[in-house]
Image: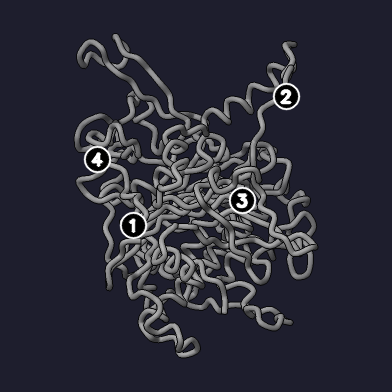
Amino acid sequence: MAVKADGEFQIALAMSGAISAGAYTAGVFDFLIQELDEWEKARTGKNLEREDDRGTIPNHIVGIKAMSGASAGSIVAAIGAVALADADHEPIEFETPRDGEQKIKCYLPKLYEAWVVKPGLVAEGEEKIDFLQASDLDGSPEPADDFSRTHDIQPSEGEPRPVTSLLNSRLLDAIARAALDVKDVMAAPRRYIAKTSHIYITLSNLRGVPYSVSFDGDKGLRENCYHMISHGDRVHYAVAGLGKWDSESAFADNDQKRELKAEWLVTPDPDKPNWKDYAICALASAAFPVGLAPRLIGATLGKDSSPAEKRKDEYEGRRWPIDSVASDLTRGPAWLDTVRAEAPFWFTTADGGIIDNDPFEYARFSLKDGGKLDQGIEHRLNAVDRAVIMVSPFPELKPIAPEGRPASDLVSSFSALMPALIAQARFKPSEIILAARSTHGSRYLIGPSRVTPDGKEQRLWHRERPARRLRGVRCAKLPRPRFSARPPQLPAFFARNVRTTAGEQNHRKLAGGRR
């Protein structure tokens, strides 16, 4: 790293969709916050328990500026932000800690409860609701318990409630409500969290957003236009009050966004975007098709296409994280007047990971300097001062279909079509090209590993050329499982072979093994 004394190293987190393996992602985030708290204490000389660290840990800030998430990753980002605001959180220790290993089981209890304690096929202990119950068929819930739609969408009166999923999604509603239960926010926000934290959540908009390109002047949407519909949607929240690191983002600060304040968790502002809608958007991103209930998301479009009304349009002024069009990052949708008249414009969602399971670009663009949006992030190992860290519980090899599959019959071809469309929607050649360079130092991957009975580390990806495939990333074992219910499988934090003495030392400190 090329970080000067009293400088800063900027981080943006990109959290992949992972279904129930989001527990792994939550464990990584939990551990990262614990380590950055320790880093902050050590670099400022406030950690009396680790006196030896004074003078050995560089005195620059390692700060988190933005998070992007899809599906399970969006749940982690959403609850993680709430956990950072909660003043009442206290780390939970192991009942019987092992000698020489850390005592802390979880650092942010809200994440642990959301991913380990509360969810289950069958309720255990003090939990009263599970995925196999049929309480979601018992009629409409009380308004405070209803996370099926954002606040601006009114339920249809008198219509029977449809079956929306195989599993009881009321469990997720209860988890979301518990996560938002904050009695007091941090009086002293963390120094390494940005004053305005940007959170991008991917959505699969089943209704779609229309775009058009006119080839004969501006004669309206019905003459000489080429029309397209995008189903890859997203919502951008800018959250104030989680930290006090003064760090700007040329991309995210000027992007269309919904603004939240941490203090509104305790004292909501009825005239401002609310935290419940924020939670519903995260649940919408995690609405795994058929298994979990879709959510209804509302947005404001403005009554017509006049400049004054366009400023109210939540889709107008959205920025696209595409290097080739950095000089013109916004492009408004081509709404029909009948659609603009809707108040609100609302749509049914499906899992955000269907179309964008790895929202790397939003994290990457959020780190870019102003005036350099058309340029890549500095990636030379001896000069890099910012990086995107991607957390992916499933980085294993994905083989193509075997020879002769699918067969040419109608059923086989149709069955293979949906997986092919999803895989293609997720394919990002520009990211692959940069990630494949072993000298590229602005991209990191945290992936799982396990330890076999004979004590050997076994990575959960293709093992022939792991360093090249994952650009020099290797996993560092945690002393105890973090958010895992299957011992002895060990989640892992990260260390990176940066091929420079100073850089390797700094990253090992950050990734740091416990002492």
Q: Nearer the viewer, residue 355 or 473?
A: 473
Three-letter amino acid code at disc 1? Asn
**Residue at the image position 76 percent from the left and 49 percent from the top:** 134
Whether 150 is drawn above or below 338: the answer is: below
Dot 4 corresponds to which residue?
Answer: 311
Q: Element type at marker 1?
A: loop
Indicate the position of residue 477 as horizontal and vertical percent values: 63, 65
Crowd class of label 1 (few under 14; some 14 to 19; many from 20; radius 10 Å): some
> Which mark sits nearer the N-terminus, 2 or 3?
3
Question: Given this view, does label 4 or label 3 mark the residue nearer the observer?
Answer: 3
Q: Which residue is mark 3?
A: 393
- Image side of residue 258 versus residue 493, left or right: left
Question: What is the distance, in whole Å, between disc 4 and disc 3 at their CAs?
Answer: 40 Å
What is the number of callouts on the image? 4
Structural distance between the alpha carbons of marks 4 and 2: 52 Å
Kindly state the secondary structure of the residue where label 3 is placed. loop
Is 210 above or below relative to 214?
A: below
Cα separation, mark 3 vs mark 1, equals 29 Å
Marks 2 and 3: CB-CB under 8 Å?
A: no
Which numbered disc flags the more N-terminal residue, 3 or 1?
1
Image quarter hosting the N terminus:
bottom left
Looking at the rendered image, the disc whose residue lies closer to the viewer, 4 or 2, is 2
- Label ID, residue 402: 2
What residue did someone put label 1 on?
382
The residue at the point 76 percent across, 61 percent down is: 486
> Which label lies toward us, 2 or 3?
2
Q: Nearer the viewer, mark 3 or mark 1?
A: 1
